[in-house]
Image (spheres, helix red, strand yellow):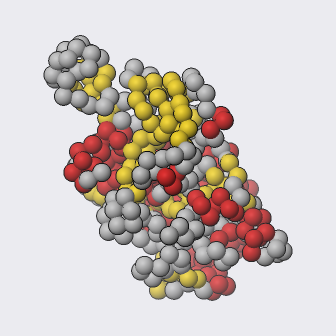
Amino acid sequence: MNVARYWRTEKTRYGLVGETCRICGEPIFPPRDLCPHCTEAGQDVRTFGGKGEVYSFSTVNDAPAGYSEYTPYTVALIKLQEGPLLTAQLTDVDEPDVHIGMPVEMVTRKLKEEGENGMIVYGYKFRPVIQA
Amino acid sequence: MKPSREVGIVGYGAYVPRYRLPASEVSRVWTGGHGGVPVDEKSVPGLDEDTATIAIEAARNALLRSEVDPGDLRSVWVGSESHPYAVKPTGTIVAEAIGATPAVSVADWQFACKAGTEALQAAFALVGSSMADYAMAIGADTAQGRPGDALEYTAAAGGAAFVVGAREQSLAYLEASYSYVTDTPDFFRRPYRHYPEHGGRFTGEPAYFKHITAAVQALLEELGYKPTDFAAAVFHQPNVKFPQRVAQILGFNKDQLKAGLLAGQVGNTYAAAAMLGLTAALDVAKPGDRILMASFGSGAGSDAFSFVVTDVACERQARAPSTQAYIARRAPVDYALYTRYRRKLQMQ
């Protein structure tokens, strides 16, 4: 990830900052130029609450470049409470304990490091909910 | 020291990673299981955790308890000896992640294990001088000890964050603080070196004990208090024995230490250690309780603080996970997995 792209998308990655469509009112994540629901342009920024549940999941044993030091890890489709479905790694959980419908919450973690001289890429992952 | 405007803690938050390395594992590998161990186990950060991620979660918990809009924070100051970058602030990552940018002062603080309380002193001063209504100070670390060294039993990871505000909004207001510092090279790490050096037994009497006792005695004298005036006392905790002994020297008893002495279960979380102990003490505090916190940072110095818990504390305690909830969320690892998680294996 180059520096400009990292910077442009960091709010989205660090804190689930997405949008609400001004035309149809639907929540949007990640942010887009056109609403995926009504195809109109014009959205307001919103921060999602970070709570959701596992919609589906799979374990990655053969990772793409940059992620191999974290294998094996679980990637899941997360259904946010506000509606959007997004893809994210799960963390702080053992793979046998993951199940569809498992309540999860967003945390900001390291996604990867771009070598010893490169940037550390931070972003959202999800883990089992810790009760207050 | 007292600010001209009365101030206090409006919100606090803790974070402890999920993984634990039992001290018996270090002993098994390096001493054949012989000899005593300084803690039962220590926290170990996961592969995707560092000081920035730990600070972010502690900061989010502090904001939950304070109900302060992050955009109203005028400082996000992170104290640590394990900042992820040599050049690039940890604080900017934390401030962006919690939504505090851009009208905010951000800095990384360094003073070994008291980097976080140094930031806290400054946060009290920033709000106490009326330059800001809210300031955030964080202590967070992912400490490393050389394999087989005495520090490897205890060098751990964790974080604690505090939102500082005016006394009338506080869950615990500040009565006074005191800082005691001398140039005492008991522990240090040179640039580009991965592991620190320490003075062995020298880290005790002329360093830890001298600085904490001097800071606490001066604070008590300034306030006209004696140890029995406090419901709880929290000291820097590089192991279990040091805080127990310094408490005994100063005249505090084991009951006063109980809520905030976490080293046996999480090890030495360095810049977070005393602050994490304070979060645990605040989790169970009752209105009217007086709490002492005294940090220690090698190099060396101690910051001592006296707080009084207010009526709003109980309502705010439940707004975020307790420190003990994080400690209870433990997954033990063996020495082999620990070497992978702490990147002690040479891969190339």
Could you say where residue A120 lies in the image, as x and y percent from the top left?
Answer: 37, 57
Q: Is residue B300 visible?
A: no
Q: Is residue A77 visible?
A: yes
- Given residues A13 and B163, the one toward you in this image is A13
Looking at this view, name the residue that lies furthest to the left.
A41
Q: Is residue B210 left or right of residue B241?
A: left
Answer with the quarter of the image where residue B203 lies: bottom right
- Given residues B125 and B49, the one toward you in this image is B49
Q: Residue at x 40, y 29 (%)?
A: A86
Q: Is residue A86 left or right of residue B228?
A: left
On screen, residue A132 above or below B175: above
Q: Residue at x 39, y 66 (%)?
A: A116
- Given residues B159 and B165, the one toward you in this image is B159
Could you say where residue B323 lies in the image, as x and y percent from the top left?
Answer: 60, 47
On screen, residue B42 above or below A14: below
Looking at this view, name the residue that lies furthest to the front.
A62
Answer with the quarter of the image where residue B224 lies: bottom right
